[in-house]
Amino acid sequence: MRPVIRTSVAPDISVGDDILSRLSDLDADLLVMGAYGHSRMREMVFGGATRTIVRHMTVPTLFSH
């Protein structure tokens, strides 16, 4: 199977929530993503996709750092 690249623009939701929404839309059964953390202050202000996925993951997830 060939990979499919998709982009989205969702200014009203966080990146992590957009990823979770896409997983549901695509009926995905696995998520593979890089795990990256920012300073606590930056994550407090902007949020963090990795943290959102860890807290709310709906499918098995493979993280790489």
Image (cartoon, helix red, strand yellow):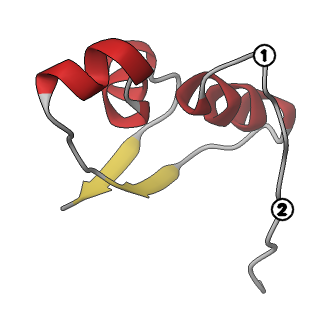
Badge 1: residue crowd in 10 Å (few <14, some 14–19, many ≥20):
few
Q: Which residue occupies the extreme left position in the image?
A: 40
Quarter where residue 56 is shown: top left
- The amino acid marked with disc number 1 is Asp
| Place of residue 39 in the rendered image (x, y in percent of width and height, measured from the top left) | 14, 33
Say which residue appears at 28% left-offset and 24% top-offset: 43
Label 2 neighbour load within 10 Å: few <14, some 14-19, many 20+: few
- 49 sits to left or right of 26: left
Q: Name the residue that disc number 1 marks.
A: 12
Please give left or right for residue 44 compared with residue 27 in the image. left
From the image, state whether disc 2 or disc 1 is nearer to you: 1
Mark 2–mark 1 CB contact (< 8 Å): no
The image shows residue 65 at horizontal and vertical percentages of: 18, 62
Q: Marks 2/1: CA distance? A: 18 Å
**Residue 59: % across, % down:** 51, 32
Kind of residue indicated by mark 2: Arg
Q: Is residue 40 left or right of residue 2?
A: left
The residue closer to the viewer here, 62 or 40, is 40
Residue 40 in which image quadrant: top left
At x 85% / y 32%, what residue is drawn?
A: 25
For image coordinates 78% across by 16% down, the residue present is 12
Numbered tag placed on residue 6 in the rendering: 2
Question: In the structure shown, which secondary structural element does the residue marked by tag 1 occupy?
Answer: loop
Q: Is residue 12 above or below residue 64?
A: above
Element type at marker 2?
loop
- Residue at point 69% right, 43% down? 28
Q: Which of 42 and 28 is in front in this view?
A: 42
Q: Along the polypeptide, which appears first: circle 2 or circle 1?
A: 2
Q: Quadrant of residue 6?
A: bottom right
